Structure formats: structure tokens, C-alpha cells
Image (cartoon, rainbow, N blue to C red):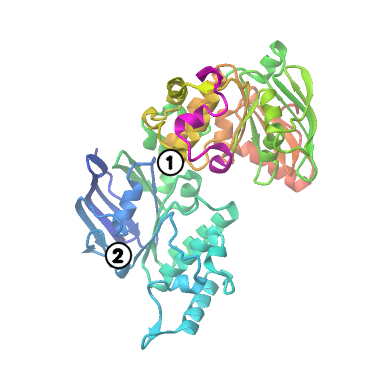
Amino acid sequence: MTQQPSPTSDGAAFVRLVDASRNYGETRAVRNVTMDLAIRGKIHALVGENGAGKSTCLGMAGGRVAPSSGLVLVDGTELPPGSPRAAKRRGVQAIYQELTIVPALSPEANVYLGQTISRAGWLREKEMRRGYEQLCEQFGVAPALSKQSGDLSVAEQQMLEILRALASKTNCILFDEPTASLAQGERDALFSTMHDLQAQGLALTIVSHNLDEVQNHADLITVFRDGTLVETRPAGQWTKREIVNSMLGDLTRGADIAAGQHRNRVSARDRSSAQQPVLQVSGLSRAGIIDNIDLTLYPGEVLGIAGLVGSGRTSILRALAGLDPRASGQVSINGKPSGVPRSVRDARSKGISLLPEDRKGQGLLLARSGAENVTLGEWKSDSRFTFIRERSLFASAVSSARPVGFNTKRLGESAARLSGGNQQKLMIARWIHTSFPILLADEPTRGVDVGAKAEILVALEGIVAQGRSMIVVSSELEEITGMSDRVLVIHEGKALAVLDSHDGPITPARILQIIFDAAETAEPVPSGGELS
């Protein structure tokens, strides 16, 4: 594959890879990559699927990974292979997903960890505290002097790592998935800090799966696929769809959905005249959270719920899944009136199943195998005289996991050993294994790479194509518009509008305009379709 040179005419390359490769046995994680990885005064984003090679390139630049062949140049001088200390001495600091904070130490002690200020063998604690406070003041961070670092949030601990880098007079910071564990406000604060550092001439490189953040904040975007560099362009010259297509290659349908391209199935208007709803909800309420929500779901339909964080999206799903016994309202299943489910068992008896947002805490038994997680709670067809037939159970898991792109050879491994994308695929495979007609998906692709996202979106579309129905909540509006036949727009717990794809394209801009109009008027705006 011909590699495109990095467009670096506006800045000087501080870290450069020259024909760099990294092999793990017979696996070639990175193949002959030549690129300007970190450029003074620029934010350079590396994107690609898990295993595409981007984090390995970051590791080689930070001295964590030794190239199997090729060179790493820092400010024009070759970096000794596999030496993080040498990289730090040259002004390169790496901040990985696994933070290196010592929980029992104070924040200032963590900032000066490995670079303490001392004289004649005695620590200069007052001087270190003063330096810590000055760094906090420089970047508008409130110093947490009375706390142990282990009591700080992930975002605050991540800021300590950044301050540690700055205390060492660094010229370059490499970030590996810096926002993966942060809330939106914390993400905004982190990028504000990164732009401040950029303005000071530092070279910043980030590895990220969040394409919206990449497009909004990076100067350059480089796409990796299968260990090779596909192309580098200025961020403004990439569209989201071009990035996704470059990352995925053949997974075009999943890429279309992820980019918000909807393939219309049957409109709600046509369905309503031919079929009764599989689910009808009236007056769904939860004091102080959601207020008088009405919605209708038809067979073979995807209904998206769109709203800003805190709007009540997840609360609607939790109420319908039986996880909020204080919710009130009326529910009809296939025309038969019923109350709001009072427990998960009650919801499942009504044919409702939830894919929770927190896959590790609520969705999976991490110590159990992938096969056990796929068939969890549905063992009747794989048991005889109350004994589970393991071969039959494993065969059922294989047939359910294959459609979601899960490597069935790994079904015997514990779920804890799998990546986030593969863990998510296990929960989708569980849906395939079961026969629940009403599926509730809360952030079905959160925290997974773009390749896994495409496979998951295609698998969900396949489930709906079998006649089952789905309500989807996602923070990514492109995902909502790409998947949904109709979209319920909510704000501060109230329904604003129902948009039908039959009436015209449902776009993120249209959804946001409805929400912003409602926020300004404090009253629901006229909908593009009837509330149902």
C-alpha cells in the first residue's frame, strides 16, 4: 500500500517514524510505517479499528514498544529502542489508558513522581507543592491538596498525568484514548487544556475511537488499517464517512449506519394501517425525571430516542425494563393492557429485554465463559432432566455469536479477557439466542472501535429484519438517525416530537434544532410528526 506523506508544512515534526515495523511472533502489528507522528503546535489524531496499529505506533514513539525494524526519530535524533526513560529525557511523555497514578500519594507527589525536587538527599516538599499549585493555576485546575490521589476522579487523575508531563518540561505528549472514561464536561475541559498546550507549541498526538472529537479538535487525522498507514490529511479535508470507509474497507453497510445513512424499511404510517403496535406506552412518568411520555413501537421497527445527556433517555428504557419500580403509566403489549413492569422478571415475561449501558456491571458475568454469557438464563433447549448439556449449549452459542462477527473460537474464554467490542457482541448474541420480541438497546456501541461498531449495527439491523422490534438510545445522533425508522425527541424528561423517516430524512441537525428551540422557549415545539 502506498503511504501518503504527512502534510507538515505548517509545523516541524518532533517525533517521526521511519519504515517502522513491529512484529509479535507471526503477527505484524505495524508494517513499514513512515510518518510525522508528533508535530510542534499541532494535534494529530490516529484512528482505526482495534489492532489497526495506531496504539503500537504510539508505544514505539513513547519508548514503551521497541520497533522490530525501522527507526524512531525525536527532534531529528534516533531514539534508543524500547526505552521510556530515554523518550522522557528527549521530551516525549506518553499518557496511556492505564493511568500511572499512585493512589496513596498526594496529587503533588504524583506530579513529581520520578522527578522529585531535592537537595542533599532531602525532599523539597514546599517547593514541589508550590510548583504543583503554579501548574494548576496555569491551566485553571483547582489543586486538590487535602486529598489522596486515589480519591480523585478519573478526569482529575488524568490531569495529574498531564501536569507531571509539564513539570518535566516536555515538548510532546502522546494520549492513548484520553476521553474513554470521561463525562462530556470533563472531555471539554481536557480538550481545552490540549488547545492551550498546542498554543504553547507542544506536539500532541491522540489515539481515539471518537470520530466527532477527532474532527472537532485535531489538526491532522491519520487512518490506520491492518497495521498499515492508509492516509494522512488535514482534519478539514476528511468527512466522517470517508474516515469510516477508510478504516473499515468492506463493511460498507455498517459504515453507512454509523455515518447516519438510513435505509428506509416500512414507514410508521404504512404500518399503522396494517398492524397493531407491539408496544404502546401512555403517560410514562417518574417524578423529577420523565414526565408523561407516550410512545408506540411497531413490529419490525427501530424507534430511536434522542436527547441531550440528562434528558431522561435511559430512564425510559429502565422503566420499561422493570428496573424502576417507582415509574408509573400504562403499557399495552400486542393490544393487551398491562402496567409498567415492576421487575426485570416481569418485563421479560412481557417479552421485553434490555441491553444495558454498563456491560461489565449489569450485562455480563465476567468470570464466566463467552458461551455461558450468550446462553445466560435461556437453557431450556440445551438441558435435559434439569442437567445442562454443555455440547448443546456451546453449539447454540456458536450459532448466535457468528452473526455478530464474534470469533467463535474464543467462546470458551472468560468474558473478562475480551475487548469491549467483543463483550458487547456477546450481549447482542444473547439477543439472537433468545426470542424476546421487544428489545431495548441503551448505548449499544459505546466504547467499541469502529469495526466492531459496524458489525454490531449490522447485527442489530438483522435482528429487526426478522420481525422483532427495538428501541434504541445513543449519544451519537448519527447512529440514531442511521438506525431508526422514527425518532422520539425528548428534553428535560418531556417528549417534544416524533420524526418519521417517511416524511423526509431525519438528521442530527433537525433533532438538535428541536431540542434547542425547546430549551429557549421552555415549552415543547411543534413536531415533524404526531406524538404517538
Looking at the image, tell me whether mark 1 or mark 2 is earlier in sequence order: 2
Return the residue at label 2.
87
Residue 144, percent across and down?
57, 71
Q: Say which residue appears at 72% left-offset and 42% top-offset.
A: 491
Q: Quadrant of the C terminus?
A: top right
- State the CA–CA distance, disc 1 to disc 2: 29 Å
The magenta segment = 357-386
Is residue 513 in view?
yes
Return the residue at label 1.
419
**Residue 275 location, quadrant:** top right
Callout 1 touching callout 2 (CB < 8 Å): no
Residues 338 and 206: in front is 338
Residue 453, percent across and down?
47, 35
Q: Secondary structure at mark 1?
A: loop
Q: Secondary structure at mark 2?
A: helix
Q: Where is 321 relative to 170, above or below?
A: above
The reply to whether the magenta stretch includes residue 101 is no
Q: Where is 522 relative to 153, above or below?
A: above
Q: Say which residue appears at 25% left-offset and 45% top-offset.
A: 24
Circle 2 residues within 10 Å: few <14, some 14–19, many ≥20: many
Q: Where is 191 relative to 313, above or below?
A: below
**Which amino acid type corresponds to the residue marked 2 in the rendered image?**
Ala
Q: Quadrant of the N terminus?
A: top left
Residues 355 and 131: in front is 355
Residue 427, percent across and down?
52, 32
Q: Is residue 315 left or right of residue 93?
A: right
Which residue lies most toward the bottom here? 120
Q: Say which residue appears at 49% left-offset and 61% top-offset.
A: 158
The reply to whether the magenta stretch includes residue 371 is yes
